[in-house]
């Protein structure tokens, strides 16, 4: 006996096997991202009140680049539209148009990832520096003309290692001042001021990476996991557009089903971002 | 009563049907098979091996508890050579090794033995047969699921040999303990544990998607929802539990992995001091977050451990009392209620974490509610026995003794569900006794019942009844001798975390009789081990020399798996199966025989 309903719908459920499978898979994905969002909420509500970076463990606001995030949202939504158009093109028996829309979808996916890695890279070389006088600075740093990434000196003892490397001063391109909502003050007097800081004045120094604050930990974990989903989805959709498209000749019905299932996953990935963007960037 | 002509014995070999069938090679037949029956057997063999391994870990621990500081006989020198002097100097189990064995005993038994044997082995082999399906809905996914499971097992096993040894923060891996046990090695046993868990979670995700889709889509003609055997219902609900409860632990695992590898502070609060020096982390995380996410899996997981077991018991009991299950529908609805409620009881594991009395009250209420459907199922099974003509074979003996054993396990859970009494009993041996009554004489007895019951279908041979009954009598006796004393120890306040079995407090007002019970438990556990020898002998000798079955339906059962050839060939059924009636039509008045198979038209 052969396995039934691999591409034909079962009459009483109205579904083919893979469609049941993908919906179940998405249900478990919702639980996965749901747990991460719950973690975000719990960490945020249990953070002490006050303004970061003055209060070390207060929840930072306004650190993420909203225009770039908005643009990326638009890119993903576009790809969600084109993946439906690709499926509709197949339904209308127009393979050439299907391929065009699928290619646009995959290109959008890689555009999204490219923009995201630009954002990541900016964070890795962005620092919070705590000084002996109790003040805290944030901004990009320059050491001997280089912009180091991933440095994390959590106490004065490890900062002293900088002195071992004959570094006595670092340049800090100080971020503009922000109000309590994280918005840049309209007429900030310190726009892109570059300040020299003596290593001996520094208590601790850390780049915007998971070790520096739970905010970065949860931000990087959720967005990286989402990014992996985008990558995985793009590879599968790309496979359907080119090598996997052979099936269009041998079994068009099953091929359309595959596009539908891939599209459902793609919409889910999009939907995660639709939640992620306001929660992490805007709120 | 002999079987009717329509159930005459057919074997897979004389059913080599029309299309050209080339014999697959060893690897594609046994390692990379996509046949649900082979995958079921793969799961069965590996999980039983892990079960034995987990049992040996426990024996070593029990020896340490009964005779702290003494070299373990027989295996002591082996431990010293394999794990190194730091771990077991002179064959004596140190505190670290004890903790390691404790954590790995729990992990191996729950994630690598019991769940795979119930869901992976029995579920895979029996579910498609019982619903009349040719295979699972996604056979290749099924294979991938087993391979992930096996790899996860290898990673867990390998963690014993990492510097610093395997994970030793309990099977619950509570943070911050789990993140600070081995600060010298970033790639310590805990990291291996987390990577192993990610593989196991992936495996169960693939498995559960496959099971649910199979049960929804591949039921044969006439197999309506209420004609499904209770075992299939149990697997269906279990599938949803695994599907929805495991991902939060995966999320938590990723977070703990980041805490361990990248120095983040998801679960590490501010101001942690380890061995006198402040931990160089940012802090700001929440240890409670880990516990919430862990127990969000952990509690549904308990029902994953028991629901399929109840399913097996229901099948075996109904067949061996020659009566329909009493209250089949209420059992189905009860199983569904358990499935739903099990998602909102998790924090009853956390009454002592200071999460607040209002929250505790909520979880206390839901915990009491979930005991209702469990009691409905157990009562229905007990009432089923009334007026039955019971056959006492090995399978039914195990299934029948499951009922009181699970009853003890369930009822002793109630005092743990009330937060007032839990404050006293928490973290004592009482908890160990309660949990093991559910899983060891409970679930394990169901597993044995299932093995004795389905063995003839899988191999075409019967297991030896005398050895089976010896196995049953010894196991029942010694199981109770192992776990009942733990209740006494718990009531006396003995902590479950001490690697010396409480000797530290000897002579400080501790009742010495409580410590003596450790010896009784050790020797009973050894007795329990000895009682498994007849089973192991029986299992292997019966594969090759057991009495051959004379019919495809040796137990005169009604469900569809007995309508297949023995053993079932690839594709299972010779002609399309059709279900004409409910699953338990035993002793129907007016019928020719005392059983009417689901596939019989009249």
Image (cartoon, helix red, strand yellow):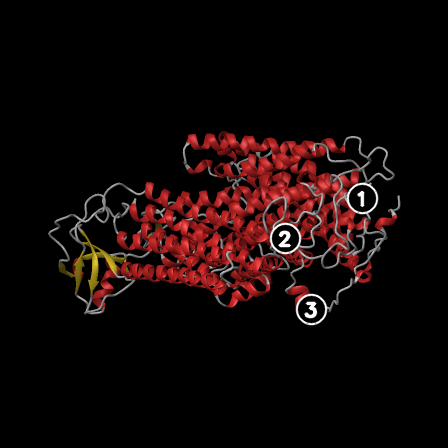
Q: Which mark is residue B26?
A: 3
Placement of B20 over or under A224, stated as above or below: below
> Which part of the image, by quadrant, shows the N terminus of chain B?
top right
Q: Which mark is residue A202?
A: none
Identify the residue at image location x=52%, y=44%. Answer: B298
Q: Position of residue B311 (x, y in %)?
A: 67, 42
Q: Secondary structure at mark 2?
A: loop
- Which of labels 1 and 3 is toward the front? 1
Placement of B484 over or under B53, stated as above or below: above
Identify the residue at image location x=51%, y=40%. Answer: B427
Disc 1 to disc 3, how far (Cα)?
37 Å
Placement of A166 over or under A259, stated as above or below: below
Residue count near mark 1 (Cα–Cα under 10 Å), binned few <14, some 14–19, many ≥20:
some
Q: Which mark is residue B600?
A: 1
Residue B496 seen in the figure: no
In the picture, measured across the screen, residue B11 lies left or right of residue A260, that is right
Disc 2 to disc 1, how far (Cα)?
25 Å
- Which of labels 2 and 1 is toward the front? 2
Disc 2 to disc 3, how far (Cα)?
30 Å
């Amino acid at each position: 006996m052969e396995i039934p309903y691999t591409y034909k719908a079962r009459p009483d459920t109205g579904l083919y096997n893979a469609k049941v499978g993908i919906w179940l898979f998405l249900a478990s994905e919702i639980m996965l991202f749901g747990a991460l969002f719950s973690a975000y909420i719990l960490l945020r509500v249990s953070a002490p009140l006050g303004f970061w970076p003055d209060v070390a463990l207060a929840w930072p606001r306004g650190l993420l680049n909203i225009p770039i995030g908005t643009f990326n949202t638009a890119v993903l939504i576009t790809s969600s539209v084109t993946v439906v158009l690709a499926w509709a093109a197949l339904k209308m028996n127009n393979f050439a148009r299907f391929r065009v829309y699928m290619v646009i979808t995959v290109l959008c996916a890689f555009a999204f990832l490219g923009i995201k890695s630009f954002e990541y890279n900016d964070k890795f070389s962005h620092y919070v520096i705590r000084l002996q006088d109790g003040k805290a600075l944030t901004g990009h740093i320059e050491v001997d003309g280089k912009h180091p990434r991933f440095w994390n000196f959590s106490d004065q003892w490890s900062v002293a290692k900088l002195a071992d490397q004959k570094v006595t001063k670092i340049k800090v391109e100080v971020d503009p001042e922000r109000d309590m909502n994280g918005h840049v003050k309209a007429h900030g007097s310190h726009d892109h001021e570059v300040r020299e800081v003596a290593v001996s004045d520094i208590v601790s120094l850390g780049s915007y990476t998971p070790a520096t604050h739970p905010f970065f930990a949860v931000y990087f974990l959720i967005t990286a996991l989402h990014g992996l989903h985008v990558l995985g989805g793009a590879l599968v959709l790309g496979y359907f557009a080119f090598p996997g498209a052979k099936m269009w000749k041998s079994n068009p019905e099953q091929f359309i089903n595959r596009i539908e299932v891939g599209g459902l996953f793609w919409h889910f990935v999009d939907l995660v971002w639709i939640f992620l963007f306001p929660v992490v960037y805007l709120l | 009563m002999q079987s009717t002509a329509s159930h005459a014995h057919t074997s897979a070999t004389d059913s080599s049907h029309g299309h050209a069938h080339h014999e697959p090679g060893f690897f594609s037949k046994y390692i990379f098979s996509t046949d649900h029956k082979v995958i079921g057997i793969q799961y069965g063999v590996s999980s039983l091996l892990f079960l034995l391994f987990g049992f040996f870990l426990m024996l070593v621990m029990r020896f340490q508890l009964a005779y702290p500081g003494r070299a373990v006989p027989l295996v002591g020198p082996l431990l010293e050579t394999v794990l190194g002097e730091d771990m077991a100097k002179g064959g004596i189990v140190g505190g670290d090794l004890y903790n390691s064995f404790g954590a790995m005993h729990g992990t191996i038994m729950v994630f690598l033995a019991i769940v795979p044997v119930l869901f992976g082995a029995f579920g895979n082999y029996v579910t498609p047969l019982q619903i009349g399906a040719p295979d699972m809905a996604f056979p290749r996914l099924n294979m991938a699921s087993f391979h992930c499971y096996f790899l996860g097992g290898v990673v867990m096993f390998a963690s014993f040999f990492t510097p610093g040894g395997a994970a030793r923060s309990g099977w619950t891996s509570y943070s911050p303990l789990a993140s600070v046990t081995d600060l010298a090695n970033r790639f310590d046993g805990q990291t291996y544990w987390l990577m192993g868990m990610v593989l196991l979670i992936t495996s169960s995700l693939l498995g559960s998607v496959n099971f649910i889709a199979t049960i929804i889509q591949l039921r044969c003609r006439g197999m309506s929802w209420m004609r499904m055997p209770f075992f299939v219902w149990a697997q269906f609900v279990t599938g949803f539990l695994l599907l929805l409860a495991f991902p939060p632990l995966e999320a938590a695992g990723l977070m703990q992995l980041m805490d361990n590898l990248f120095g983040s502070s998801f679960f590490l609060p501010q101001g942690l001091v380890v061995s006198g020096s402040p931990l160089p982390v940012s802090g700001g995380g929440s240890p409670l977050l880990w516990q919430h996410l862990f127990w969000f899996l952990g509690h549904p997981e308990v029902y994953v451990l028991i629901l399929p077991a109840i399913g097996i018991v229901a099948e075996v009991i109904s067949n061996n009392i020659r009566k329909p299950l009493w209250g089949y529908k209420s059992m189905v609805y009860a199983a569904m209620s358990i499935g739903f409620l099990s998602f909102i009881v998790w924090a009853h594991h956390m009454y002592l974490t200071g999460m607040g009395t209002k929250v505790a009250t909520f979880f206390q209420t839901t915990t009491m509610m979930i005991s209702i459907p469990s009691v409905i199922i157990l009562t229905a099974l007990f009432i089923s026995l009334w007026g039955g003509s019971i056959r006492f074979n090995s399978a039914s003996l195990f299934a029948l003794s499951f009922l009181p054993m699970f009853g003890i396990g369930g009822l002793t859970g109630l005092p743990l569900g009330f937060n007032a009494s839990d404050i006293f009993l928490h973290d004592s041996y009482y908890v160990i006794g309660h949990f093991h009554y559910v899983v060891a004489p409970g679930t394990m007895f169901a597993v044995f019942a299932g093995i004795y019951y389905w063995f003839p279908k899988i191999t075409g041979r019967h297991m030896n009844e005398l050895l089976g009954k010896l196995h049953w009598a010894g196991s029942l006796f010694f199981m109770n001798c192992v776990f009942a004393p733990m209740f006494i120890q718990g009531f006396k306040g003995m902590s479950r975390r001490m690697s010396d079995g409480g000797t530290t407090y000897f002579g400080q007002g501790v009742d010495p009789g409580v410590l003596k019970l450790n010896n009784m438990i050790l020797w009973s556990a050894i007795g329990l081990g000895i009682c498994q020898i007849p089973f192991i002998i029986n299992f292997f000798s019966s594969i090759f020399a057991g009495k051959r079955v004379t019919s495809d339906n040796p137990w005169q059962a009604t469900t569809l798996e007995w309508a297949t050839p023995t053993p079932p060939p690839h594709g299972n059924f010779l002609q399309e199966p059709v279900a004409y009636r409910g699953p338990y039509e035993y002793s129907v008045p007016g019928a020719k025989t005392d059983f009417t198979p689901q596939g019989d038209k009249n």
